[in-house]
Structure formats: C-alpha cells, structure tokens
Image (cartoon, rainbow, N blue to C red):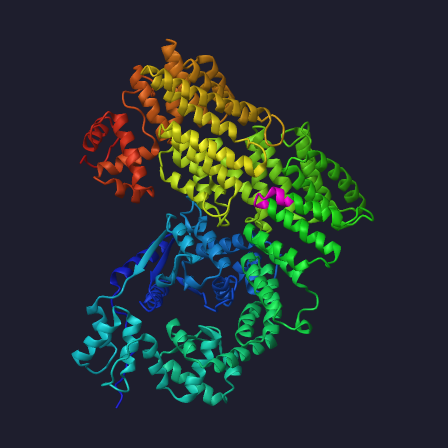
Amino acid sequence: MAQSIVHAPFVGRDTEMARLRDVLDRAGAGEPRAVLVAGDAGVGKSRTLAEAAAYAARNGTVVFTGHCVDLGDVGLPYLPFTEILGALAADERFAPLLEAHPATARLLGGGADGGDRLQLFEGVAALLTDLAGTTPVLLVLEDLHWADQSSRDLLRFLLSRPVLQRPTPGAPAHRLAVFASYRADDLHRRHPLRPLLAELVRLPAVERLELRPMPDTEVARLVRSLRAEPLPEATVGRIVERAEGNAFYAEELLAATAEEPGAVLPSGLADVLLIRIEQLPAAAQQVLRTAAVAGRRVEHELLRDAVQLPDDELESALREAVGRQLLLPGEGSTYEFRHALTREAVYADLLPGERVRLHGVFAKLLARRGRAGESAERAHHSRESHDLADALTASVEAADHAHGIGAPAEELRQLEGALDLWSSVDAGARPRDLDPVTLTLRASAAAARAGENHRAVSLSRSALAGAGPDADSELAARVRYTLAGDLMRVDHLQAAFRYSSEALAMIPAEPPSRTWVWAAATHVMAARYVGEDEEAGRVAREALAVAERLELADAQADLVISAVGLDPRSNRRTARGRARLRDARELARGAGNVPVEMRALFNLAVGCFESGDLDECLAWLSEGLDRAGRAGLLSSPYPVEMRYVHSLCLYTLGRWDECLRSAADADRLPADAGYAVGPALYVALARGDESAVDRARALLEGQYDFMAALVAGITLVEAAVLRHDPQAAVAQFRTSVATLTEQVGARPDATVRLAALTLGAIADAVAERRSAGDEEAVRRWAATAEELVRAARDTAAVGEDGSEQGPEGLAWLARAEAEWTRVRTGPEVDVWRRAVDAFGDPYEQARCRLRLAEALLAAGAREEAVAEARAVGETADRLGAVPLRAALDTLVRRGRLAEAPGGGEVPALTARESDVLRLLALGRTNRQIGDELFITGKTASVHVSNILAKLGAASRTEAVAIAYREGLITTGSPT
C-alpha cells in the first residue's frame, strides 16, 4: 500500500527569509529595495520567493509576479512585465493608474509608436512609482536567466531610476520591493545576464542573495516532514546523501519511492522525475507531454485543443497531475509545471516524431488564433515541427511585432531567423512582398538600432553579396550606400568611400530620384571623412538642388549638415553655422526622419562644446537624448556619441559627481560603445582610482573603435603621467596618435591634449635629471619634447576638419607650450598665467595653477604663490582630486607655504576623505571601508594615505587621534 505524502513544508532558509522579510519591512516603510536571488536549479528559489510573497501579502503588500520562459530560439519581448501589467489590469482597483499611463498599453496589446522605447520605459517606471505611492508593492521576477534582452533592458532602467531610491522629503514614499531569481548554474561565461548582474549589484538599492545547498540536517527534516508515517533512517540517509542539499531533488527522490518503498533509487534527477510520471495514468502522462512542448506555462484552452481529450478525461488527468504536484494551476486559466526541471525532463524524454507532431499542433493552433504577440512562439513551434514555410512567415510577423513594441534586439533575432529559413522554403511559399536582399537590409537597420554596428556591417555585406550583378540598379545602389553608412559607423572610412562612389555611379542624376539623392548624401559624408572635400562640396551642392526640387526635406537636412562641416568660415562653431544646423533639424523633424534629426542635434551640441559654450551644449544634448529615447534610438550611433559628450561636458565643468552618476545610470550601452561613459574614467583616475587603467584597457578589446581608442589613449597617458613614468607616457602617446591617425587619415584633435599631458611628465623628468647634473639625459628628453610640442602646434593650427581648433584645443596648446618652456629653461610665470587663463575647465585650470605657484615660488613671489596654492587646494578638495591634492601638499611642504591650504593648521579633507576617516575611527580595514563606500580597497588605501599625509600622521591610530583633537571627528571613540 502506498505511503501518504503530505504537502512539502518550508524547511530551513531562516537566514535568507529573515533578509527578505527585512527588505519587505523596509520597503513597506518607504525604503525601496531589490534583491537578486541566485541559486542552482531545484535549490528552492521559487519556494523561497513564494514564502516571501505570502509574508508580504499577509502584511498588506500587493504582489505581482512575472515569469521568463525558455523557448529556445524565441525571444518574447517584455514577457515578465507583460504578465505583471496584465495582472495589474485585471485588478479593478488599479484601473485609474493604468489610464493615467497610456504608454504601458503597448505591453497589453494596445499598440503605439513602435520606436517609442524610452516612453514605454518611463511609462512603466511612472506607473510603478504611482502604484508604490498608493500601496506597498512587491514585484517578483522568476527565471531571469531566460529573460529576453528587452526585459533585461527594462529591468536595468527600473532598478537604476528614482522609483528604487529614497524619495525627496515631502514626496510620496516609494513602497516597492523587487525580487528577481536566476539559476546561477546556467550562467556560462558569455551568458547575456552576467554583465547586467554585475552592473545591478553595484547599485545602492540592490543586493544579491545566494541560496546555497541546504545542510544535511535540514534536508533530513524536510524528508521526514513529507511523510505522515515514520521513515526508516536508512531511507532518509540514502535520500539525504543523494540529494546533496537540493530540496527539489530530495522531494522527488522521496516521491519516487512512494509506490515502491524498497525500490533502488535512480542515479539522476531526470530518472527520478520520469519514474514519478510513469506512475501516472496514461491520460495524465499525455497531458504532461503535451504541456511540456508548450513550455513552462500553458493556457487551459490551448492545452485542451492540443491534447484533444474529452473534457471529463482531460479534467481527470489534470487533477491527477495537480494532485501529484507536477502541475500547478495559475491565474487566467493556466497551468504551469511546478518546477522547470520537470518540464525539461518530460520534454527530453519525448520521441522525436512525437515532439515534431506536438510542435506542429501548437503552431497550427497559434496561427488560428492570430495574435500578434504569439507570433514568436508560433515561429518556434513551426521551426521545431519542420514547417519551415510557416516558421518564415511567423518570424517576419514576430519581427514586425518586436519593432512595434520597441524591442530592436528581438526584431533582429527574428529577422535573422527568417533569413536562415529563406533558402529552405519553396519560392511559392515565401512572403510575396519580400525578397532576401530587402529582408537583409531591414535586419541591418535593426542591428544599427540595437547598437550592433559591426553586425549591421556584416548584414549589409550579405545584402551586397545577395544582390548580385543582375540586381535592379536602384536596389544595388541602395545596398551600397547602406553598406557605406554602416562602414562609417565602425570607422572603415576608405571602404565606405569606395562603396558610396559605386552607389552614386549606378544611378543617373537625371531624371532626379530619391535614391540618387540619398546615395549622394551618403557619398558627401564619406568623401568628407577621407579628406575629399572638393568632391564632397561639388556633390553636396548638386544634391541639395535636387533634394529641394523633389521636396525631400530629410535628405535636404542631411546635406545641409554636411555642407556646414565643409564650410570653414561657417562651420558648427560659428553662430551662422549653428543657425543652419537648427534649420536642418527642423527640416528633419518635419519629415519625421529621426536619425537625421539626431545628426543635426549632435552637431549643434558639439559645435557649442568646441566653441566653449558648455551650458548651451548641455541643453542641446538633453533635447537630443530625450528625442532619441522617445524614438527608441538611444543605442544608435549619434545618441551614443551624445552620451559621451554629455559626460565630457560634466567632467569639463567640474561636475564630477554628476559625471559618475551619469555613467552609473546610463542605460545599457551596445558592446562597442563603452567609450560613451569614458569621462567617468578621467574622474576616477583624478580621484586616485587605479582601476580606471584596467577599464581603459578593456575598451581596446574586440574590434577597433575610434572613440574607444581615443578615450583609452587619454586615460592611459594620464595614468602614466600620474605614475611619473615619462617613458610609458611617450610610448602611449605615439601608439595612440598613430592608431587614430591611421583610421581618420589625419592627426586627431586630441593630439594636442595627449602631447600636453606627456610633455608634463617629460618636464618633471628633465627637472629631476637637471638637478642631478645629467645633461645627456636632459638633451635626450628635450629632443622628445620638441617632437611633441611640434605635433601639438601643427594639430592645433589644422585640426581634423582642416581649421584651427577651438578654445579647448588652444588651451591645451597653451599648456603644451608652458610645459615645453619648463623643459627648456624651467618654470616661467608668464606662460603659466596664459595657460591658467586659457582653461575654463576647473580641474585643468587648477593643475596649471599648481605649476604657476611653482613658477611664482621660483621667482620669489611667495605671497602670490600662496594665493595660487590656496586656489588649487580649494578646487582639489571640492573635486576630490587626490593626486592633485598630494602634489599640492608636496609643493607646500617643499616651499614652506604652510598657510596655503586654507586657513588652518590642518589641511581640509574632502567629503570622501571625511567618510573614510569616520570609518577609520571605527577600526575598519581598507577593504571594509571600500565595501561600505562602494569603492575598491585600493581606492580606500589611496584615501587613507592621503589622510595620513594631510594630518602629518605616521599611522592610522595617530591620524584618528589627531582628527579627534582637531575636531574632525565628533562622535564615537578613537581606536
């Protein structure tokens, strides 16, 4: 007689549940939090979250759950959030909230502008903010390891936004908690979830909770509690040994012995699961096999139509599967496998023919229903059932749906799937309005929108190969100028010029045509990039006339932008040039061409930056990024560059904390766009964080990118300078300038900055060698310095666009000249005054002031030196510039400028140093300080060393004692 099995109790996990309950309690009190719950399959993630959700519900928290599913090659955009919003919409209490946020209707099938991705993200965030303002809310996201990219992007957006931060005083509390689970054992090295997890755990409101295997004592307690009758200790011991701390495995091992208590336990979990299923009646087994093909969850109606059993037999079979806790009834007349491992075991055990047949059944049922949101699922079933014609049609429909809800990565995935299928489908069964070249070009466009620029190039090349010599001339030209545009985005400029030339030659200028105009517009850009300005100007003038005649406003706008770049007297730095760019922006906006509008806005912002008007630059950037976000183009090239310029503006203005926050809050960047937050590396380095060097080197990995190489070059030269390593600085200068010059065909504008930085390191080395009497070394370094100052002068006079550089470039030239003077004769006051006056950047101005103070001291002007040193100290402390502060302290000690730091005997500490000092007083180690302040232990060590230097202390204990004596610490007790 079978022994009775009782419902599995919740055993163990006391520590983990205490943490989750604490998070829920704090969230209920207005402190929003998120927890990422990790663990191997079967270790108890779902059960733990279910217990936490039950605790939340008992305490008045509204709980919404979304699941990610594993359907192999299918991407179901935003699936867990669609499920959550569906449950929210089904609750009448929240109907007014949904009506107040219409953008979220896109995830509920309400439709919207397909590109308005940022509006969708902001709509969901605003909805959650309002919801959490009316009631405590818990969002549970299950199985993130199966999440699609769009869901990962939306999760990143939500967790990094104010909805998961403490509200400002007086604002409604954000009573929100987010629990998300994932299988740790599924995360291989290249799993797409890994970089997101690494990013999220750095957010202050996000923590990670790992569910480890349960101790043997807890597993034994679980096993005993599952039986109403006592179990032999030998049986318990065998199960505990086999389960290895996995609760689900233990339950299944016990259940497998229910009918045969003396049976030998199988060796694998799949075998255990299948033994249990084989004990079921035939109808119940049929239901489980069919449901396994559908996925983790299946609607009752769909399952009924697929199984084709009489209603009474179906209900009996379902009751049996539910009673054995293999299936669980869910909301909306659905059933889901209690554990994904069960579904995987059943699916793997299907016979090949059975699997193909059942996939075909579901494909036909989904096609009959005709729901747009199910087209990706239908494509999967059709492919697995070998109905490739329907898989092709469904993949194209799924791409249309993904485009409609702003999911470019999933759109690309479906289009690539369609391309894979194309040659395997008979011509008569293919979509009539498509051809492989057009489909490939569409995939290339999706790749560009998703920020996968190199993939876009690869697809455009495939389109070129597919077009062949007999292709229609207009299509052949369109393929070539599309490829040229893609190549320009990855800095393959000569190749881009070659293909744009071919495209233009394929289409006659008369009669005028849209294709010719766009081929010409692309060719103008390519010609400009390779220095063929005369040809670019000639084609631009001709194409502008044709665009105006054909009333092609967006092409006219694109050509106007190029024409501004070709006119040295009215370029983007001038008021006249920017006026023309504003006109181009309006033309593009009126035509609805967002990419061209982005190009106009980018050039407006950069023109303001180059002319020194950073406030106006930020205004244009804000407008441009907002427009890009609402069009779903934040990952496309110009908006990515706008994010870089935005960070650079904040850095240049000395708004360093904002620069770092901007980098931390940035939405997911494409793989080859890490440079966009590059100025945050400059901040990190200037604050003594040496990890910036490794992050800079990481930008050079993978395929070449001009901007990545530029950011890395500046960071690595700066790092060598701060290490007082002139040889490394010179080597990096030469490598960076040569690499960048090779790609653009001219020395980059940044040559002036790189040369000035490197000259500083050389001047330091010369001063040291000169004081040691080593004239041979002085001559060698002087020769190198002359090479660098000439490069700076030449580049400042004739920059990348053929004109003299703007205020920033001229400021760096002034610094290069001042450093060159240091090499030749030592520090001179006048040249350093000119450098100080040239810079608007407070950090670079302070660095020049430090040299000016040094020159004044050498000239005997001590009072002026003190004044300059004081100004340097104030800037260094405000910015948290650790190396600059240390260099100042060295000069103050050497020159006996004791009063310089700012009025007291003890130099002022930065805000971060005060935080570190407080933790020092509590006896924290460098690593503990780093953990509490979210910095590296190495950075904490730099701050500690700087504190000791400022306080004149020989040890940490002495530093704390001095701090108490001087009133720098007012609470606690010294260690």
Q: At 66% across and 45% down in the image, what residue appears?
A: 498
Q: Picture coordinates of residue 652 (x, y %)?
A: 49, 31
Nearer to the camera, 516 or 2: 516
Q: Residue furthest front?
A: 776
Residue 774, relative to residue 718: is it above or below? above
Nearer to the camera, 332 or 41: 41
Which residues lie in the magenta part? 489-496
Q: Picture coordinates of residue 251 (x, y %)?
A: 29, 75
Residue 495 drawn in magenta: yes
Q: Residue furthest bottom?
A: 1
Residue 512, relative to residue 51: is it above or below? above
Q: At 56% across and 70% down in the image, what residue appears?
A: 379
Nearer to the camera, 8 or 173: 8
Residue 133, relative to residue 248: is it above or below? above
Residue 783, relative to residue 676: is it above or below? above
Q: Residue furthest right?
A: 511
Q: Picture coordinates of residue 458 (x, y %)?
A: 58, 54
